[in-house]
Image (cartoon, rainbow, N blue to C red):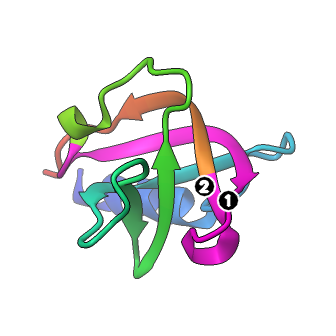
Amino acid sequence: AAARWAVRQEALARSWGSDGEGGALLIGWVEVRQGAQTTRPFALTRNGQSAIVHDFEDRWQLSDFVGRELVARGTWRAEVGAPGGRVLAVSELRVLPSRP
């Protein structure tokens, strides 16, 4: 089981940033950004990489997922003042199971 987990995690790590269809696919833990602007307080973090994520359509309360590992699919939106100048507009979320 541990070996399968390691292979799965490696495959997920390679997919950071693109879903192969022009969108973005991010895997990581939801965190509240310290000192963040109130409109975009959440980030998805994995292996030292972090991206601001936001549900522009108000389908999910991202605060419910803080500390959970998720797969988030969406598109990048340019946003002045955001780290990297962009925010992931989330269109789909999947909660990953806890680690063994």
Amino acid identity at mark 2:
Val
Q: What SS does tag 1 mark?
A: loop
Q: Residues within 10 Å of mark 1 (few under 14, many from 20)?
A: few
Q: Which residues are magenta?
A: 66-87
Left or right position of 11 against 42: right
Left or right position of 75 against 31: right
Q: Are marks 1 and 2 in contact (CB under 8 Å)?
A: yes
**Residue under the point 45% across and 21% down:** 58
Q: What SS does tag 2 mark?
A: strand
Image quadrant assignment for residue 56: top right
**Residue under the point 64% across and 75% down:** 84
35 and 72: which one is in front?
Answer: 35
1 or 2: tag closer to the N-terminus: 1
In the rendered view, tell whether residue 58 sits above or below residue 79.
above
> Which x, y percent locates residue 68?
22, 46
**Residue under the point 67% across and 59% down:** 79
18 and 86: which one is in front?
Answer: 86
> Which x, y percent locates residue 3?
31, 61
- The residue pinned by badge 2 equals 87
List the single residue furthest toward the right. 22
Amino acid identity at mark 1:
Glu
> Which x, y percent locates residue 88?
60, 49
- The residue pinned by badge 1 equals 79
